[in-house]
Every structure is written in structure tokens, then in C-alpha cells.
Amino acid sequence: MKKTLLAAALIVGFAGVAQAETSVTLYGILDGGIGYQRIKDSNSGDKITKTGMIDGVQSGNRWGLKGTEDLGNGLRAVFQLESGFGLRDGQQGQGGRLFGRQATLGLASDAWGQLDLGRQTNIASKYFPGIGDPFGASFGQANAGASFTSANTVRYDNMVMYQTPNFSGFQFGVGYSFNTSAPQDWKVSGVDDTNNKGITTGLRYANGPIGVALVYDRVENDFTDTTTQAWALGASYDFEVVKLHLGYGQTKDGFFAGQNFPIDGGAGFAWPASAGVDGLKFNSYVAGVSAPLGNGKIMASWQMADPRHEPTGVDLEKQQVYSLGYTYNLSKRTNVYAIGSYAKNAFMLDNVKSTLVGVGVRHQF
């Protein structure tokens, strides 16, 4: 009997030690609602519309696992596996990948920063949207990605990323992808390298009422033999009663992430995804405000993608997007939202207009 009690005590003790050294968290977000979407080409009369359920509007639906193990001397092993899905049909997102949103393993330290290996978002998507745009990376065509494609939740495969600790609000990050959108190919002697290599880097400052972010991305596109580049500068200042957001940037020779103006896309109307377009150059602008209202927040923004150089035989126009939204907190984990957004010359195409309105609820666990 004494031996049994002793064994039970030892098991409980070791379990406590293991729990103190290692932690694994299951988390997720569910987001769905009702909305109306329309894209119309006034030149041809073509139009697509949809009224019904919408999902992943404020936040993409997801579930994930993340964990840490204490390795001693302030060093930790860290991992994160995150899977996206559609709430309407339960189908996997990101092209059917099991962990398409993120799949990383790394080492972290409060003293020297964090190193992550695997599929993950680029630095521009981490640093720019929350500072330069009141809608951040959320709410479909209202978010910064409608004009700043390098900050449109861009994910690179085969990436090694390092980020420094936060030094009084300053943080620097840099990443390198051996092939941005597929398993890394073998390099065959005498044959051109088919890997689309990518570089992402940026610096941000967030301390008190001030936020500033400067980001840069570069991706080689072997299929079109182009190198797409983009940089963006964002800033914000919180006056407490209202927060001001501003952003400016430029993209050359292509796009970084597709932007479907309808929340779930629409045939014939979309930015190309990670495509090289030789000779294309456009400037991007965003200006917006956010302010607390009741138990929530109101947001408004204007953004523009202004073509400065066009590929041969292509005629592009200034795309402008006007958006208004509101979120209301029902609890710490659940909120409701409303969004309205209108785009003129959507996708920089003359007289193509996109309208989006919707209401929904989001729950985090």
C-alpha cells in the first residue's frame, strides 16, 4: 500500500514538472454572418452578385496548436500549427493544406529574439496592417491588402525568419524563403533554378501613442522571369479619442497576394496571386481613423492603388476604396461587427465597381 501511494505521488510530481516545462495550447476563431456582394463592369454590363452567408470577414476561420518547452537559460523551443477552413462548408482553406495558415518550429529567447522555420506570413503582413490601416488585415476589400498586396497576409513556404526582441518599442525582422509557394525543387546542373526565392524584412516601432512600420519584400518569379518588389511605410498616432492611420508604398513588376474583392472571390474579377507582371508599377496610399464608440470601435478609411507605369497594351486606372466598419464586444471573446465598403475602378480596371456590406459575429477560443 505504501509503495502504491509512493508511486502515485511520484507520478503526480513528475507530471507537475512536465507541465511547468512544457505547454501546448489549442486555440481558434469562428467568424460568420450575412452579407451582400456585387461587382459590376459598367463598360460591358457584366455583373456578379451574391446575398447570403459570409464567413472569415473580421478574421479568417481557423484552429491551431501552439506550444513551448523551457530548455533552460532563458531558451525555449516553440512551435505553431494553424489550419484555416470555411465556416459555411467546413472545407479546408489555403488550397486544402492541413496547416496552410502556419506551420513553424523554432527557438525563442527574451534576450536574443526568435528564429522560426516553416510556412509563415511575411514581415510586411506582420508589421504594416495594424499600424497603417484601421481595418488591419481584416474585412475583405476594406483591409490594407486591397492596395498593398505585399501586406495582404502573404505566406511564404520554406522560410527561415528571425525577429529581434522588443527594445523599448523597436523590433526588426528578416526572412528568407528558399521557394515561396511550393516544395523546394532540386537544382539540376545546366538547368535554370526553378525555385522562387523570397526576401522579407522590416522595422517597426510601437510605444505609447506612436506606431511606425517600414517593410520591404522581394520575390523572384521563375515562370515569368521577373522579380517583384514592394516597400511600404505606415504610421499611426493615438489621440485617445481618435486614432489616425496613414500608409504609403510602391510595388513593381507584379503582385504579392491575390485580393478577391468579394469575400469568397468571383470568377473573372481578382488580383493575380503572387504573379510577376513585367513593367507594372503602382503606388499605394491609405488614410483612416478609428475611435472607441460604446463598447466597441468604429473604423473608416480611404485607400488608393495608383498605376504609375503599365505593361505594354494594358490600360489601368486609379483604384479607390472607401470603407466604414464597427465592432461591438459582447464579451472578452465574442463580438459582433458591421462592414460597408465601395471600390471604384476595382483591380485598377476602368469602371469596375465593387460593393460589399455585411454583419456578423466572431468568437475566439
Image (tube, rainbow, N blue to C red):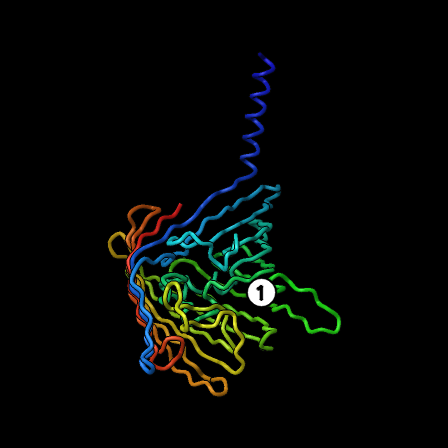
**Residue 264 as seen in the image, left or right of residue 228:** left
Judge whether residue 323 can be spotted in this image.
Answer: no
Residue 208's place in the image compared with 40, above or below, is: above
Quarter of the image containing the N terminus? top right
Q: Position of residue 14 (x, y in %)?
A: 58, 28
Toward the bottom, the furthest residue is 313
Residue occupying image coordinates x 26% and y 52%: 295
Q: Quadrant of residue 55?
A: bottom left
Q: Quadrant of residue 271?
A: bottom left
Camera-nearest residue between 349 and 324: 349
Toward the top, the furthest residue is 1
Type of amino acid at the residue the image marks with label 1: Thr
Residue occupying image coordinates x 71% and y 73%: 191
Q: Position of residue 246 (x, y in %)?
A: 38, 70
Residue 221's place in the image compared with 241, above or below, is: below
Residue occupying image coordinates x 42% and y 51%: 90
Camera-nearest residue between 126 and 44: 44
- Look at mark 1 in the image and give the residue it sits on: 180
Task: Give the total of numbered labels.
Answer: 1
Binning the other alpha carbons within 10 Å of mark 1 as few (below 14), some (14 to 19) or many (20 upward) gives many
Judge whether residue 292 can be spotted in this image.
Answer: yes
Quarter of the image containing the C terminus? top left
Q: Position of residue 262 (x, y in %)?
A: 36, 66
Q: Position of residue 53 (x, y in %)?
A: 32, 57
Find numbered disc 1 in the image and state the secondary structure of the residue it sits on: loop
Residue occupying image coordinates x 55% and y 44%: 68
